[in-house]
């Protein structure tokens, strides 16, 4: 289904587009995900709408069925970021946001240590302070950070739109299930072009 509307104060929330996450292979080209996110960020900034850049600096350390696989992937940093059990060592630049995002002092920067961008970060309060009632989500991974943040946002009463061509995952199966099934319970889904087409309807 295409995205149908944006509230007057809508924030862009970009999930985990950082050096330690986007290195391993993904289901979609990183250049597409980053390029679409940058196009959205530029358009939101031009309209003085909030842009939230989220990075992850560790996981909650809880045991899951995937903990062993996460531990095996920890050499690249990818495993711990998605919540494998126990502490992990990260490369020095693991949590650095991609420079293409053009982070500025006007952006809201959020560092999380869980899957959702709302868990223990104060993000809800920072959005409420700016009268935000809707978020547009991009980033990685679709079935983890993006979906978890969408669920949390919906539970908190925010409208949610996910730009699915500005998201990706480790496997196309996980991305496709999240984008076409799971996320549709908590959000509208659409393309970057559809979101950009809705922006002119908002007053500056």
Image (cartoon, helix red, strand yellow):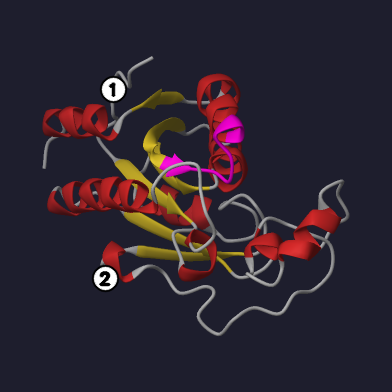
* Of pointers 1 and 2, the one earlier in the residue sequence: 1
Residue 59 visible, this orientation: no
In the picture provided, is 57 more to the left or to the right than 165? right
- Residue at 85%, 57% in the rendered image: 68
Image location of residue 129, percent across then percent down: 39, 53
In the picture provided, is 55 more to the left or to the right than 114? left
In the picture provided, is 85 more to the left or to the right than 48? right
- SS at mark 2? loop
Image location of residue 32, percent across then percent down: 32, 46
- Quarter occupied by the N terminus: top left
- Residue at 58%, 19% in the rendered image: 181
Q: Magenta segment range?
A: 167-174
Residue 52 or 142: which is nearer the viewer?
142
Residue 80 image-quadrant placement? bottom right
Residue under numbered circle 2: 104
Residue 152 visible, this orientation: yes
Residue 204 image-quadrant placement? top left
Q: Is residue 70 magenta?
A: no
Residue 143 or 12: which is nearer the viewer?
143
- Residue at 54%, 43% in the rendered image: 169
Image location of residue 176, percent across then percent down: 53, 27
Image location of residue 200, percent across then percent down: 11, 32
- Relative to 26, residue 95 above or below: below
- Relative to 150, residue 53 above or below: below
- Residue at 67%, 57% in the rendered image: 114
- Relative to 23, residue 166 above or below: above
Residue under numbered circle 1: 5
CA gap between label 1 and label 2 equals 27 Å
In the picture provided, is 63 more to the left or to the right than 89? right
Give yes or no for contact between labels 1 and 2 (Cβ–Cβ under 8 Å).
no
Badge 1 density bin: few <14, some 14–19, many ≥20, Cα 10 Å? some
């Amino acid at each position: 289904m295409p995205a149908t509307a944006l509230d007057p104060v809508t924030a862009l929330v970009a999930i985990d587009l950082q050096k330690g996450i986007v290195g391993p292979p993904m289901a979609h080209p990183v250049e597409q995900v980053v390029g679409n996110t940058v196009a959205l960020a530029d358009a939101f900034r031009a309209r003085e709408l909030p842009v939230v850049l989220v990075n992850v600096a560790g996981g909650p350390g809880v045991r899951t069925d995937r903990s062993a696989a996460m531990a095996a992937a920890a050499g690249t940093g990818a495993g711990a970021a998605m919540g494998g059990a126990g502490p992990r060592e990260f490369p020095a630049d693991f949590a650095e946001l991609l420079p293409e995002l053009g982070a500025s002092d006007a952006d809201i920067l959020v560092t999380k240590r869980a899957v959702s961008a709302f868990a223990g970060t104060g993000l809800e309060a920072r959005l409420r302070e700016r009268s935000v009632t809707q978020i547009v989500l991009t980033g990685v991974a679709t079935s983890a950070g993006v979906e978890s943040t969408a669920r949390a946002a919906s539970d908190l009463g925010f409208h949610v739109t996910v730009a699915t061509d500005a998201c990706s995952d480790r496997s196309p199966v996980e991305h496709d299930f999240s984008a076409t099934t799971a996320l549709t319970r908590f959000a509208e889904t659409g393309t970057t072009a559809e979101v950009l087409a809705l922006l002119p309807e908002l007053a500056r």
